[in-house]
Amino acid sequence: MPHWLQLMLESLPSLLWAALIFTVPLTLLSFVLGLTVGLGAALARLFGPKPLVALVRFYVWIFRGTPLLVQLFLIFYGLPSVGILLDAFTAALIGFTLNIGAYTSEIIRAAIGSVPKGQWEAAYSIGMTWSQAMRRTILPQAGRVAVPPLSNTFISLVKDTSLAAAITVPEMFQAAQRIVATTYEPLILYVEAAILYLALSSVLSALQTRLETRLNRYGGFLEARS
């Protein structure tokens, strides 16, 4: 057996374990929390009072305009300077959540804005309140429009979790770094990590395609593909 293949097989369990324990939970938690933050920010931006709109715009401006790695460093290494101590996973979760929230807020805001005004009027005409119209009429339609960009954001987040290694989160990429430190085989280990990220992203891309096809069939917002 070639040396490179043997090394890959020996290191594979450690990389998969790190992905299962840290990479996947960090991705899922960050996306769910970030999506919640993004929805709240989008609604505030569209329907909130001017001071709240200004605050949300400032938040989005900061987190979309600065590198994610810098944000993680500020949270993990910077906050202790003012007495706020966070463990690495919590700091990464906060950083990814706020970053994803900023991006998803713009996606959701654009999706809600794409719903025709007539849908609001139709909902009000049958006696719905604002919250009922939003929940039953507007968000379902906006959700169909938002699925493709939100799915792309989720797939990007899977890859971005590798940045958590920089603040000592023992996720998959840091597991590869630790093995490199003992084997002195960076090319083999980093290629293996890249293959695992590629495999995970490919699975998610296939699921995204199936979801969009299903929405095409029932939602009709895109031309159905065979």
Image (tube, helix red, strand yellow):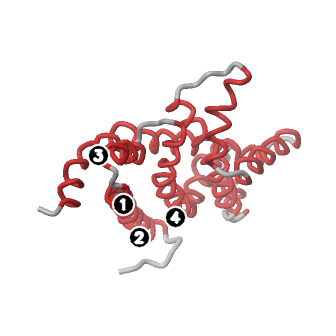
How far apart, in angstroms, are the residues tagged by discs 4 and 3?
Answer: 28 Å
Q: Residue 107's spot in the image, x, y percent?
A: 64, 58
The numbered disc on residue 148 is 4
Q: Circle 1 sits on which residue?
A: 187
- For disc 1, the neighbor class at 10 Å (few under 14, some 14 to 19, many from 20) is few
Q: Quadrant of the C terminus?
A: bottom left
**Cβ atoms under marks 4 and 3 closer than 8 Å:** no
- Dot 2 falls on a residue whose secondary structure is helix
What label does residue 217 carry, if any? Answer: 2
Please tell me which of labels 3 and 2 falls first in the chain: 3
Q: Nearer the viewer, mark 2 or mark 1?
A: 1
- Tell me the mark number nearer the camera, choosing from 3 and 1: 1
Marks 2 & 4, CB-CB < 8 Å contact: no
Extreme residue toward the top, this view: 83
In front here: 126 or 167?
167
The one of 137 and 170 positioned closer to us in this rendering: 170
Say which amino acid is labelled 4. Pro
- Report the mark closest to the observer, 2 or 4: 4
> Residue drawn 37% across and 44% down?
181
Asked if the residue at tag 1 contacts the one at tag 2, i.e. Cβ–Cβ closer than 8 Å, the answer is no
Mark found first going from the N terminus, 4 or 3: 3
- Position of 200 relative to 206 (above/below): above
Quarter of the image for residue 44 reads top right
The percent coordinates of residue 129 (x first, y second) are 69, 43
Residue at 67% across / 46% down in the picture? 127
Foreground: disc 1 or disc 4: 1
First in sequence: mark 2 vs mark 4:
4
Q: Quadrant of the N terminus?
A: bottom left
Residue holding disc 3: 16
Q: Amino acid at mark 3?
A: Leu
